[in-house]
Image: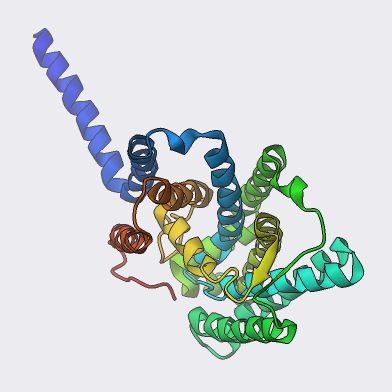
Amino acid sequence: MENTRKERKFNNISETVKKYVTGHVSDVAAYLGLIVCIIVFTVTSDGRLWGNYNLTVLLESVCVYMIVSLGALFVYSMGFMDISVGSQMGVYCLLTILIVNATGSLLLAIAVVLVLTLICGAFNGFVAVWLRLPSIVTSLFLMFIFGGIQLLIMESTGQNSISINYDLSVMLEPWFIVIVIVLVAVMVFYFFNFTKLGKYTRSIGANERATSQCGVNTTKWKVIAYMAFGVSVTIGTFFLLARTGSAGKSTGNSYSMDVMLSLILGGMPLSGGMKSKVRCAIIGSFTYALLSNGLIISGVDINMVYIIKAIAFFIVVAISCREKGVFLPR
C-alpha cells in the first residue's frame, strides 16, 4: 500500500516535471546551456576560467553584451531585429575618440552619440513601417552606411587605429561594471514588464494586427522600441571603448551577431511575443561570454571557435523556433 502511494507520488512529480519541461523547452535549454558551459570550461581550462585575471576579462565582455542585449529585447520582442548595431558601435567609438581628443569633453561625446543612436532608432522604426519593409532591410541599409563611414574616418586619419586621450579606467572597475549592469537590468525589467512599452512590443510580436485593431499605435511603439535600444547601444559603446582604448576599421563589427546569439542562447524566440523575457538577455550574455572565453582559454583553435558557435546557433534557433516554424524574425 505504501509502495503504491510512493509510486503515485513519484509519477505525479515526474508528470509535473515533464509538463514544465515540455512547455518551457527554451528556458530549460538556456539554463542547461549555461550550466554545461560552466562545468565543461572549468574542467577543460584546468581551473583557469576562475582565475582573477580571466574573471576580470569575462566581466568586461559580459558587460557590453548584456547592456546592448537588454536594450535589444524591446526590438526582438516585436519579432524584429537590427543588424546595424556593430557598425554603429564602431562609428560611435571613432566619433567619441575624435570629439574627446579635440575638445577634451566626454560629456559632449556622450551627447552626440546619444542623439545619433536615437535618430538611427527612429529611422529604423519609422522607415520600415512607412515603406512597409522588413526591419532587416532598413538595418541592412544602416549597416552599409555606417560601415562606409567607419572606413572613411579611418582613411582620413591615415592610421590603422586611433586611441582616446582620456582616462576611462573607472569604467573597467568591477564594482562600477556591476552597478551599471544592475541599474540597466532593473530599468529594463521595469519598462519591459510594467509599462506600455514592454507590453505593446510583446503584443506586436505575438500578433501585430490584433494589437493594431485594439487601438494601439504600433508605428509609434516600434519607433520608441528602437530608440530605447539606441540608449543601450550608447552605454555599451562607451564600455566597449573603455575596454579597447582605441578603435579602427573593424571595431564593433561582430556585435550585431553577438547580440542576436546572446539573446537566442538565453531562450529568446526569434518570433518575439509573450515568451520574451528579460532573463533571456541576462542568461544569454553570460552563456555567450563563457562560450567565447572558455573555448579560447581551453586551447581551441580560433577557426574551430567560429564553427562551434555556428553549431550552437543553429541548434538553439531550431529549438526556439520549433512552434512558429520560422527561422528568421520579421
- Left or right: 214, with 274 as reference point: right
Residue 262 in the image: above or below residue 39: below
Q: Position of residue 31 (x, y in %)?
A: 38, 42
Front residue of 231/98: it is: 98
Q: Residue furthest top?
A: 2
Q: Position of residue 292 (x, y in %)?
A: 44, 53
Front residue of 288/200: it is: 288
Q: Position of residue 168 (x, y in %)?
A: 77, 53
Q: Residue at x 70, y 37 (%)?
A: 175
Please say whether residue 193 is visible from this viewpoint: no
Quarter of the image that includes the C terminus: bottom left
Quarter of the image that includes the N terminus: top left
- Left or right: 37, with 276 as reference point: left
Residue 99 in the image: above or below residue 43: below
How many marks the image carries: the answer is: 0
Please say whether residue 256 is visible from this viewpoint: yes
Q: Residue at x 33, y 62 (%)?
A: 317
Residue 102 in the image: above or below residue 228: below
Front residue of 100/85: it is: 100
Q: Quadrant of residue 227?
A: bottom right
